[in-house]
Image (cartoon, grey):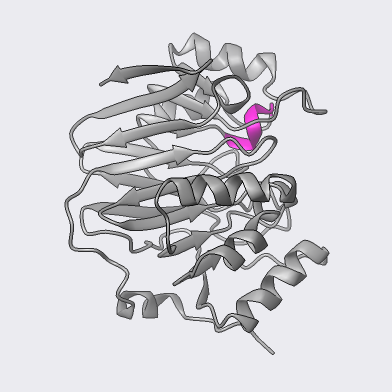
Amino acid sequence: MRCRFLPFFLLLLLSLVGCVNAELTVHYIDVGQGDAELLQSGGHNMLIDAGPASASSKLVFYLKNAGVKSLDVVVATHPHEDHIGGMMAVLNAFPVKLYIDNGEKTTTPTYKNLMKKLVSANIPYTVVKTGATIPFVNRISIQVDNPGSLTGDLNADSIVLKVTDNAEKFLFMGDAADGTGDLSAQVLKVTHHGSNSGTSKSFLNKVNPEIAIIEVGSGNDWGHPTKTTLKTLQSKGVKIYRTDLNGNIVVRSNGNSYTDLTTVGGVNTQTNK
């Protein structure tokens, strides 16, 4: 059996775009050494990555606590376990209207079982490349800025997404080191958990972020985030949040300004921009 694959132009025929002008809320979820981000606006929900399998229960609990009853779009940036390990739990817990990845295949049981689940649950599935747009809600543009073509390097082939909410812009790098087009954004999800593979000075000059969010596990075996990456971000005057230190990070945008909110030691800290 094969996944219910949709050519990308058919996405425009799907009734995913909500006619709303509600606030955009972006959650950077603490799933340990992995990535998971939730976008919410006007009752619509989009998940980018699902962390490792070890954080599946925590992720599903967080999504339910955030009011998620179904997911309009789920994006797997690339098929590494720390990005898709929790996907099976997500697909079991919530109806999903559309599943998106970059078309990269692996032989891991995690990936194979996930693709079987798409078939058995009859979940629409499509592949995106640079230049595609993902429908979400009418005010918010979601542009795919990587990959142009697959190289076989799972990290480099990650889907890169630029989310534009009028004046406010969010960049999600997956584990890719770069992307194409205009990458400028106020809020940057730092690539590859803050490793040395990415987040160069030249890259930051393209993005010019105000906030950098590093999704990383405490005491991880890879030494993420590296001192080099932290120093590079600090040299640009970027405000750094880390899920290993700050827990879940939430940024809210009304299209003209944003508010960043975290919980540190049980105390809310908030900044308005």
Q: In the picture, which quadrant includes the N terminus?
A: bottom right
Nearest the viewer among 31 and 216 is 31
Q: Is residue 243 visible?
A: yes
Determine the residue positioned at 37% across, 61% down: 133
Determine the residue positioned at 45% across, 49% down: 161
Q: Position of residue 79 (x, y in %)?
A: 69, 57
> Picture quarter containing residue 242?
top right
Is 105 situated above or below 171?
Answer: below
Number of marks in picture:
0
Q: Position of residue 223 (x, y in %)?
A: 77, 22
Classify residue 183 as left or right of residue 87: left
Is 255 situated above or below 273?
Answer: below
Determine the residue positioned at 51% across, 11% down: 234
> Picture quarter containing residue 169?
top left
Nearest the viewer among 133 and 2 is 2
Q: Mostly what secondary structure, the magenta segment? A: helix
Q: In the picture, which quadrant includes the C terminus?
A: top left
Nearest the viewer among 187 and 98 is 98
The magenta stretch is 191-196
Determine the residue positioned at 48% across, 69% down: 96
Residue 177 included in the magenta stretch of the image: no
Classify residue 95 as left or right of residue 58: left
Classify residue 242 as left or right of residue 223: left
Q: Position of residue 72 (x, y in %)?
A: 40, 65
Classify residue 94 as left or right of residue 255: right
Residue 193 included in the magenta stretch of the image: yes
Q: Is residue 102 visible?
A: no
Is 74 situated above or below 248?
Answer: below
